[in-house]
Amino acid sequence: GRSIVDGVSAAHVVYASSQTHSSVEKAARMAGLGSRAVRTVDVDPVTLAMVPAHLAELVADDRAAGLVPTMVVATIGSTSTTAIDPVAEIGAICRSSGVWLHIDAAFAGVAAVSPALRWINDGVAQYADSYCTDAHKWLLTNFDATAFWVRDRSHLIGALSILPEYLRNQASDSGDVVDYRDWQIELGRRFRALKLWMVIGWYGADGLRAHIEGHVGLAQELAGWIEADDRFEISAPHPLSLVCLRPRWPGKGDEEADDSTMSVIESLNRSGKVYLTHTKVAGRAVIRVAIGAPTTTHENVAEVWDLIRAEVASRD
């Protein structure tokens, strides 16, 4: 519409949660909206998923203030903790408010190849306006390979299509081909689909399901070991292949405990036996154990758990 010719205005606002990937704020800056246009929706303190009631409240308040609620970004499998937003509830709010709903399923979307995990996409078919997932993160495909879906391609093409005379040709003018130059910022694009096609052909649906389900099973086993050890606590839900945990550090204040947790990560990473990352949940430092390599085995995960326990025990 008007924004294509006149540009965006300061009235447009976008909604995301504290768990949403940082690329959303970057995109808002690139689009000319600025960081202030991104509203932060509350998350449930237990699940870390977006709270639909707060989203509805923010949308209503912004509209009453004369602003234009433009897009909501819901996440299926957040980077930090693999939190999964309630897409169906969020989607109903977007639909009734006339707001675009984008689903960021970059890491976790491919898990839906497993019938047991298709629940993560509940509400997507009914409500999502666009959806993306990265095969290069968990589906055995080399970087980069992102699958992007849009419900109504005319909105995307209308925003990005510019047809100078030197790009015109009979095939494009006839409408017989899909010009992906109108689906993206760049005019050209690599043949990314080929490597994904080869992965699917080599492993097959059953092989890809076994790959995903195997990692999820290892993560759930690790979570069980953590829950059985009262020196540790699980810091976030673990529906997929990421487990976030924290040593309890009895007798230490929050700051000292967080320093100790970070020290454990740094020490283990220096050992060369394992590589761990961290995040913060409710302001507290936690250890992230992400299972995603195709060669990871039960023995590998058991060794990681033994290393973590031994490192923590050495600091008691």
Image: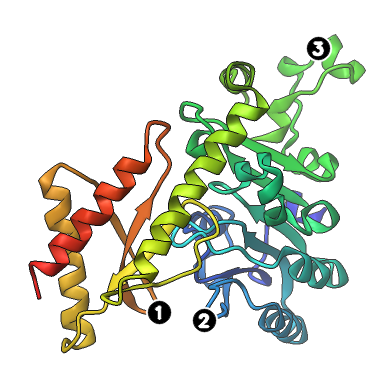
Left or right of 268, for residue 165: right
Q: Quadrant of the C terminus?
A: bottom left
Tell me, yes or no, if residue 52 can be seen here.
yes
Hey, which residue is sitting farthest top in the picture?
170
Label 3 Cα crowd, 10 Å radius (few <14 / some 14-19 / many 20+):
few
Q: Quadrant of residue 123?
A: bottom right
Separation of residues labelled 2 and 3 (CA atoms) = 55 Å
Tell me, yes or no, if residue 186 can be seen here.
no
Q: Name the residue carrying label 1.
A: 282
Q: Quadrant of residue 103?
A: bottom right
Label 2 vs 1, first from the N-terminus: 2
Q: Is residue 277 above or below residue 134?
A: below
Residue placed most toward the observer, 176 or 255: 255
Query: Disc 2, disc 1: CB below 8 Å?
Result: yes
Label 2 vs 3, first from the N-terminus: 2
Q: Point out which mark residue 169 bears.
A: 3
Hey, which residue is sitting farthest front in the picture?
228
Q: Name the residue carrying label 2.
A: 45
Q: In the image, residue 233 lies at what x, y percent?
A: 35, 74
